[in-house]
Amino acid sequence: MPMPFYVSPEQLMRDKADYARKGIARGRSVVALEYVDGILFVAPNASSTLYKISEIYDRIAFAGVGKFNEFEQLRIGGIRLVDIKGYSYSREDVTAKGLANAYSQSLGSIFTSEVKPFECEILVGAVGDRTEDNELFHILYDGSVADRSGWVAMGGASDRLLTELEQRYPEGYPGSAPDLSAALHISLDTLQTVEERELEGSGLEVAVLDRTRGRRKFRRLRGEALEELLTS
């Protein structure tokens, strides 16, 4: 009688984590920075239709890195979840923390139960009435959640990006949060330094959660509006 194949749980989890990290490392990074009027999201992305940064709800945005079809599946599921909750209760009951917890449970369940984990990391951001009320939740492929402030970097080069952002972001957060133009240049300089190439507006995906807007805070920056900020 042949012996059954056995892999220890520790080795299985390590193999899954290595597999997920390698898949994420093949994709481009995403950087999010808090600025004086909200949260800025920047990602190298030559496509004009396949977005890595999207609106989820009134004050909430979503960003993903890694395998597109997997984080897009999470984005669509998140929109359905918050729409049902906002319709069933009230729009104020929809929170970034609640959505991040739901994503954490889904990714954690997939990581432990499925043969192949999701090869993606996601970010859930919500803009508050004040800078210190902003929320940034970084959710990893295994369901781990980290609550960030100031800045977040995701992707294969996240460690290097975080080091660069720590050096470039103004000290004294939240009182010293930069304006939108300065935040964009910090993000762009950081990405160019780490990727060792020049990035132009046509190759960038840029969006903001702007607290000065009406009910829906999400706005994409492109075309003349983006070029004006890049040249200012």
Image (cartoon, grey):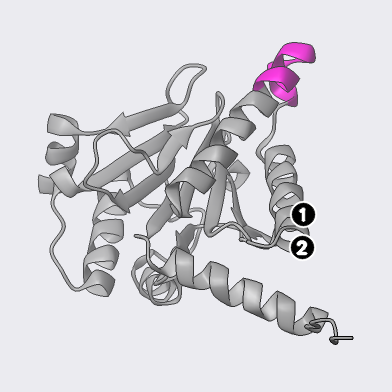
Q: Amino acid at mark 2?
A: Thr
Query: Where on the picture, by quarter, is residue 88?
Result: top right
Secondary structure found at label 2 = helix
Question: Which residue is at the front of the view, 61 or 52?
Answer: 52
Query: Where on the picture, by quarter, is residue 18?
Result: bottom right
User: Which residue matches tag 2?
Assistant: 112
Q: Does 193 appear above or below 151?
A: below
Secondary structure found at label 1 = helix
Whether residue 180 is visible: yes
Which x, y percent locates residue 97? 71, 42
**Residue occupying image coordinates x 62% and y 42%:** 133
Q: Does 45 appear above or below 25?
A: above
Magenta segment main secondary structure: helix
Q: Amino acid at mark 1?
A: Ser
Whether residue 127 is visible: no
Which x, y percent locates residue 140? 61, 61
The stretch drawn in magenta includes residue 21: no
Q: Is residue 232 left or right of residue 77?
A: left
User: Which residue matches tag 1?
Assistant: 109
Give the residues drawn in magenta, as a range.
Answer: 83-93
Q: CA distance from mark 2 to mark 1?
A: 5 Å
The stretch drawn in magenta includes residue 87: yes
**Residue occupying image coordinates x 71% and y 22%:** 92
Disc 2, disc 1: CB below 8 Å? yes
Which x, y percent locates residue 57? 56, 26
Q: Is residue 38 left or right of residue 84?
A: left
Query: Where on the picture, by quarter, is residue 118?
Result: bottom right
Q: Is residue 62 left or right of residue 157?
A: right
**Residue occupying image coordinates x 44% and y 35%:** 54
